[in-house]
Amino acid sequence: VGALGDFLASVLNQNTTAWRSSPAAVSLERALVRELARAVGCEGFSGSLCGGGSAANLMGLALAREARAPANEDGVQPGGVVYASSEVHMSIPKAVALLGLGRKALRLLPVDAQLRLEPGALARAVEEDLRAGRRPLAVVASAGTVNTGAVDPLDAVADVARDNGLWLHVDGAYGGLAALARPELFRGLERADSLSLDAHKWLHQPVDCGLFLFKDAGRACAAFSFAGDYARVLGGAGDVEGFAFFDESLELSRRFRALKLWLSLRYHGLAAFREAIGRDLANAQALGEAIRQEPRLRHIGQGVLSAVCFQYAGGVPEAERDAFNAALMPRLNARGRVYLSNATLEGRFCLRACFVNHRTRSEDVRTVVDEVLAAGAALEAERGG
Ligand SMILES: Cc1ncc(COP(=O)(O)O)c(C=O)c1O
């Protein structure tokens, strides 16, 4: 249904800029965004659809900079420091660099045993920067890290953010939509100032379906609108439901992205998505368990969501396992039955399985294990192991 919606959006080719030129598409997108925000526990947030999590993260930090380090009277914008865990997605350093904050303005903080940001480490880093005369700007909490699906302690991070005047951006691009199925894992999500979600990940949409949400539309307008009074005088550029999309986000010309997601939700119902996410979570747990039961595999890391990291051990000496698994991954994928990516955990090269597909069945979990064992044995034999 999502693919059909995408096709229809191309046929209509509606440029979804503002209500004035695109009333139906804008109204539908606004309603959809409100519905999704409410569904993940962020009632009252607004926002828009965008290309993906990277774009949403860039916008989140743009709002943070505008809110916490506005330009002075001469138009000079001061810098500031952004905090995140060492497990944060690469789109965050990219956003920090693109915003001109300087690559050194990102503090990558230590994580706890479950690979989650440590609120104590965050508080200490902020204190140190304040003492050194630097300006703390924002903290990025991950609601599902890309490597293991760890969810940072959102409530505790929000407390530190509140106490220190930091903007709280939550990167939920991979995991945030699991709040539909497991809201208890995401306590504190509603305390975010801005939030990234990716419907092309865990709402199974054709790619190009990110979602950027914020609590205060005025902040978004401060970051993105250069029309100022002109828009207000004209009246037309404003949206009947608030600002025009181009006044509160990066893009001007925009696809009618909402159509595919809205159609999917209407056709299948939110409950079907909840169930599909629940199945993915259960499959990930089952894979973790199967790996722990299998002496030829080593389970290395798994958060509360659907990413599972492990190594093929077989008869490979410990010191050679990283290189062996790095060689194994492309061979495994070339067999064409399963597709695994990789992650580096504790300095080790891991195979990474991530379940976000509504078509994955519980039988596929066994296939992952069997395929890794078969590909691993073949590589060992080839190397004379
Ligand atoms: C945690 C996290 N943030 C951001 C992104 C970037 O999302 P996108 O690929 O939609 O730009 C990803 C993608 O894997 C992710 O896992």
Image: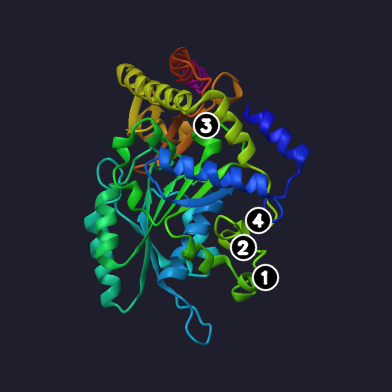
Q: Which mark is residue 234?
A: 1
Residue 148 seen in this snapshot: yes
Q: Which residues are magenta?
A: 374-384
Q: Is residue 280 above or below residue 111?
A: above
Closer mark to the observer between disc 4 and disc 1 = 1
Residue 330 seen in this snapshot: no
Kindly state the secondary structure of the residue where label 1 is placed.
helix
Q: Amino acid at mark 1?
A: Leu
Q: Amino acid at mark 3?
A: Ala
Kindly state the secondary structure of the residue where label 4 is placed.
loop
Q: Residue at x 31, y 79 (%)?
A: 133
Q: Which mark is residue 18?
A: 4
Closer mark to the observer between disc 1 and disc 3 = 1
Along the viewing direction, whichever of 250 and 147 lies nearer the viewer: 250
Closer mark to the observer between disc 4 and disc 3 = 4
Closer mark to the observer between disc 2 and disc 3 = 2
Q: Give percent across and percent down for residue 256.
A: 67, 44
Q: Amino acid at mark 2?
A: Gly
Q: Amino acid at mark 4?
A: Ala
Lower position in the chain sequence, tag 4 or tag 1 = 4
Q: What residue is shown with label 2?
A: 238
User: Badge 3: how crowded within 10 Å, few (<14), some, or many (20+)?
Assistant: few
Q: Residue 3 lies in magenta, yes or no?
A: no
Kindly state the secondary structure of the residue where label 2 is placed.
loop
Q: Which mark is residue 119?
A: none
Estimate the spatial distance between the alpha carbons at disc 1 and disc 3, rounded to whole Å. Answer: 61 Å
Along the viewing direction, whichever of 380 and 278 lies nearer the viewer: 278
